[in-house]
Amino acid sequence: MTFERRRTRQIWVGDPAGNGVAVGGEAPISVQSMTTTKTADVEGTLAQIYDLAMAGADIVRCTCNEREAAEALAQIVPRSPVPIIADIHHQYLRALEALDAGVACLRLNPGNIRKPEHIKAVAQACKDRGVPIRIGVNGGSLDPELYEKYGDAVTPEALVESAQRELDYFREVDFEDVKISVKASNVPIMIEAYRQLSEAVDYPLHLGVTEAGPPPAGLIKSTAGLATLLSEGIGDTIRYSLTADPVEEARAGRQLLEALGLRERKGLDLIACPSCGRAEVDVIGLANAAQTALSDLNIPIQVAVMGCVVNGPGEAREADLGIAAGRHKGHLFIKGKNVKVVAEDQMVDALVEWAKLIDAEGIDAALARADAGAEAEAEADRAALLDEQGDDANDAGTKVELIRKH
Ligand code: SF4
């Protein structure tokens, strides 16, 4: 099942023949993040860009707040694995310098650069070079005039009007190579602003909840806004704005798109049971250890960590690989079929070994290596546990009796 996407125009962030990324149209929804280094620190910024690209960012934005930053961008852009967007604050001259540095796109905040002649000069320069602009409206820095017009409040209508005004300036120089964002920190306002904008224009939209804050609340707020819109087919590129290491932003963006089936899985999808009275092991500790051991392998498989062999292999039968605990052993399974039994302290190592095997040889080849006795041993442990714990390990029957007494 997939979500039907609203059709937008397509633009290119960067060179289609190089590391450029298409945004809009039928292009895959892309993940963005932003560096937190001083852009003037070329090596530090490049190191972070590589980390972000590894974590799933398709496009990275760097601040261009001073001349030194623009000069550094000239050195960063040719060495970057992903297209670089320059974030322009109040000085339109920085935009022109960033274009000279060869950036793939500019981000302009209509609330910050307000002189029409400056806006048009930047749009004309972008047009001359074939470089797109993101109109980045932000509730926190909304044009004061619009803020006043809408009753001293950030409203969806005010955000959309700010974007429309900027578009009008761009059209005066016949420039429409744009994508747009209308971010707010209030999730319902952000959702409504994007809904209204997507009705009004067919430019690609960059989604984000601004100033979402540190995880986990920032992740939840961002996901609420982004996932709602993506499930309605709205959005062509996304950014989590977290008060955290930006690698977390890139990772979250990628994981959200994978979870919604909007991008192919690139890395690990670890699922785990919530644990219950049947658990034969510390499921939280085991799941965290497995996540740590498997994450960096970048193997695109789903791995299940299950607390008991009674229900684990069945409940996680869709997983490519999994392990279920039982009687001080780990029962390894592939697509629900038990393939090996290992000692309890070998469970994580076994997952790593078999994940690599699946990656190298595929599921069928791994299944062919199943130990002959694994299925029978799992069945015996399942039966023994049922015998010991009964079929009501969570003691639900006693609770039901208690309830009935009232
Ligand atoms: Fe986990 Fe087993 Fe409980 Fe299911 S029954 S939640 S697999 S411990």
Image (cartoon, rainbow, N blue to C red):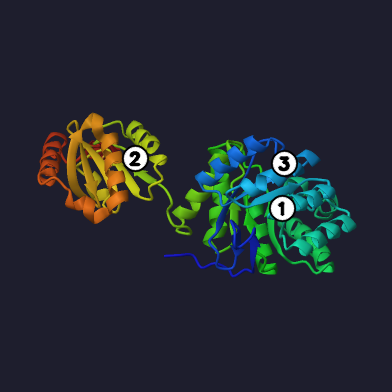
The quarter of the image holding the C terminus is top left
Instruction: Give how far across and how far down residue 118 sits, in percent.
Output: 87, 55
- Disc 1 packing (10 Å; few <14; some 14–19; many ≥20): many
Quick one: 153 or 11, which is closer to the camera? 11
Quick one: 388 or 129, which is closer to the camera? 129
First-in-chain label (3 vs 2): 3
Q: In the image, is 349 to the left or to the right of 11?
A: left
First-in-chain label (2 vs 1): 1
Residue at figure coordinates x 32%, y 42% from the top left: 273
First-in-chain label (1 vs 3): 3
Q: In the image, is 314 to the left or to the right of 46?
A: left
Q: Which residue is mark 1?
A: 102
Q: Which residue is mark 2?
A: 274
Q: Nearer the viewer, mark 3 or mark 2?
A: 3
Q: Amino acid at mark 3?
A: Ala
Instruction: Give how far across and how far down residue 145 sits, in percent.
Output: 86, 52
